[in-house]
Image (spheres, helix red, strand yellow):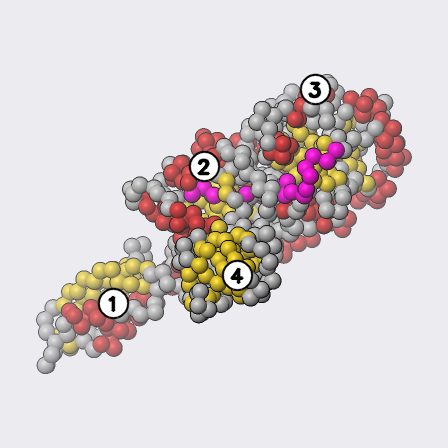
Amino acid sequence: MKHELLVPVGNKESLIYAINNGADAVYLAGKKYGARAFAENFTLEEIEEATNLCHLYGVKIFITVNTLIYESEFSSCLEYIESLHKIGVDALILQDIGLIEVVHSMFPNLEIHASTQMHNHSKENIKFLETLGVKRVVFARELPLDFINDLDTTMEKEAFIHGSLCISYSGQCYFSKCILNRSANRGECAGMCRLKYNLLEDDRLVNNSDKYLLSPKDLCSIENFKELMDSNIYSFKIEGRMKSPAYVGIVTKIYRKIIDDYESGKELQVSQSDLDELKSIFYRGYTPSFLFNNEDIMNYESSNHIGLYAGKIIKVTPKKLAIKLDIDLKQGDSIRIKNINKGITLNFIYDSKDNLIKSGTKGTIIYLDNFLNLTKEDEIYLTSPKLPLETNITKKITVSMNITAKLNEKIKLEVSDGINNITIYGAEPSEAINQPITKENIEKSLTKTGTTPYKVSSLNINISGNLFIRNIDLNNLRREALEELSLKRMKASKEFIKNNYQENLQNISKTKEIYVLARTKEQITVLKKYPVKIIVDKLDLLEPTFIYKIPRNLLTYPKYNEKVLNTSYASMIENSGNISDYFLNITNHYALNLAHKYNTMVTLSFENDFNELKNIMNNYPTSNTGLLVYGKIELMMMKACLLKNTFKAKNCHICKDKKTYKLIDRNKEEYEILTSPQNHTSYILNCHTTNLIDKIPTYQELGITNFRVDLSSETAEDTVNIIEQIISKININS
């Protein structure tokens, strides 16, 4: 099976590095709707230019429109997608279920890939995506390779093989949104997982100093690549649209070489120099991660680029640093000094006689100016090797040529790239009076491709008689043929098709309920006295009249006999006719309508502000919706057990203990940690309680009639107070 190497591109320079180093496909974003909002990204005009460039060199281009789409921007987003379709991009990477359904209906031959932001973690999720017309699924990074291989699907399979990891399931992280109002589902992640935290156990400090307790190492599959090559994953995806062009070039080059070697029958070998080169460009520590059933994924000591160990400062004077090198270093390389954690660029390197030199080799001693005023020895790490600047495409496209020339007939030149065939006719040759044209002359003219993207791999010359052909005629033939070939290569592979979208909003019977997630027996005892629907997330708390909150990260979803709260697209496939949670990330009425095909009541995303809620309800007044009005939101859901990793427990029973655990951030805010023994998952609750109880009458005026409460550590007295406040706010006549 042939595999695709899919490469991230954050700007035009990165695009050049990706093409030159062997990308089969690239993914990039426009200025809006991409999950890396702070990358440089591309204007629409730049996307068109990039598309032409990619197609010229045989590279596919995918555009990320992988954020949640608010009601107010849905129309403009569709206009943007229509423009992308006209440009001829090869596929869109989408997250929003409403957008997927509408795009597939309006533009049926525009290829859709389901972003990893859709939390693609189960068999049922895959089944759901197939019903939406999705061509390719990008798997959740928590899935093991054997599970992916065993999945039966008509869709192409795509998985991340290198780059940064999220500690939370993608699409299920609300940390940035809740704390800094920067939505990870909108491409605005603030990297809360890369900050320092302390851990409390029953209000006792566990770790003595700040650690990066939520910061994972980087994914690297290079040493496990044979398993990937033998898998049925079609597309190998590299993460890194926020990374440098040099990162794109180095990572692409190394994985390209491995793939090509393996596909050509060579033994797959990974050199130490390849690993060192990867570490030099970006390295937080490497892990094969869950893809290869490896749970050693955390780096508690650093959340930033560590670099490649390069040597040691062995002598410090007020003016100079003497460094014994463990690798080669050259002028222009950037290094980091470990203990002071400061970086410098090697603009001036000296030898022992204080002469400027351009480089130093492994095992030698070089000298640097001590402008950082270091006073003691330290280690140094290479953090950015100086690479040749790549401003032009150097990749060449091989073509074959066939020229036929006869007296009284136009010269015919045929050019083929193996897929596209071009035929050009030129002037008629004349009979030679003195010196006839030679094959050498013809070859010299036709293979002179210069700065074009092409090189001639074979040339067949058929000439009859003694002919005179001007060089200018041969040059014109070559130029016209290659220009026409370029136009043909750049032409969109799919015809632009646009259908009118036929909206069919369902008329759902409205209910008026208070749904309360209870986590303790004490809370349940109180709640039974009130007209509320009780939700539990633990099977040992479940009673016949209760609603069971289905875990969000099962590999497969059974059909439950109980009433359930669907927490994912996957769970609602097998358990239709129930209600849904806010984790479905519903931010527009198109997504709401699709969710209503499976759910009688849909809880809207808390990421909607008041105006967006108003817009949704105005456009879908016959829906039956709910909203979270009280509780601590689950900021993160993690497969990597925070407690097990922190305590380095091998046979872990921490989640069965009755102790309480909390994270403390730099502002001394406390985040409660919940664990689930039944699905081995950790959850971090918000340090702040969402309280919108006073706004319930206003929400009712919008048409929202169901209200949700998430209890955590509230006492019986707290529970009574909360429920009675809500009941007092509800207008029974609305």
The residue lying toward the viewer, choosing from 321 and 62, is 321
Residue behind mark 3: 540
Q: Which mark is residue 625?
A: none
- The segment highlighted magenta reads 204-222
Residue behind mark 2: 154
- Kind of element beneath mark 3: helix
At horizontal 45% and vertical 61% (from top left) the residue drawn is 366
Which mark lies nearer to you, 4 or 1? Answer: 4
Residue 155: x %, y % from top left: 46, 39
Mark 3: few/some/many CA within 10 Å (<14, 14-19, 20+): few
Residue behind mark 1: 447
Residue 261 in the figure: left or right of residue 315: left
What is the CA distance from the residue labelled 2 to the residue labelled 3?
38 Å
What is the CA distance from the residue labelled 3 to the residue labelled 1?
77 Å
Q: How many marks?
A: 4
Q: Which mark is residue 321?
A: 4
Q: Give, as a three-letter code, the residue at label 3.
A: Asp
Q: Give, as a three-letter code, the residue at label 2.
A: Thr
Mark closer to the chain start, 4 or 1: 4
What is the CA distance from the residue labelled 3 to the residue labelled 4?
64 Å
Residue 97: x %, y % from top left: 60, 43
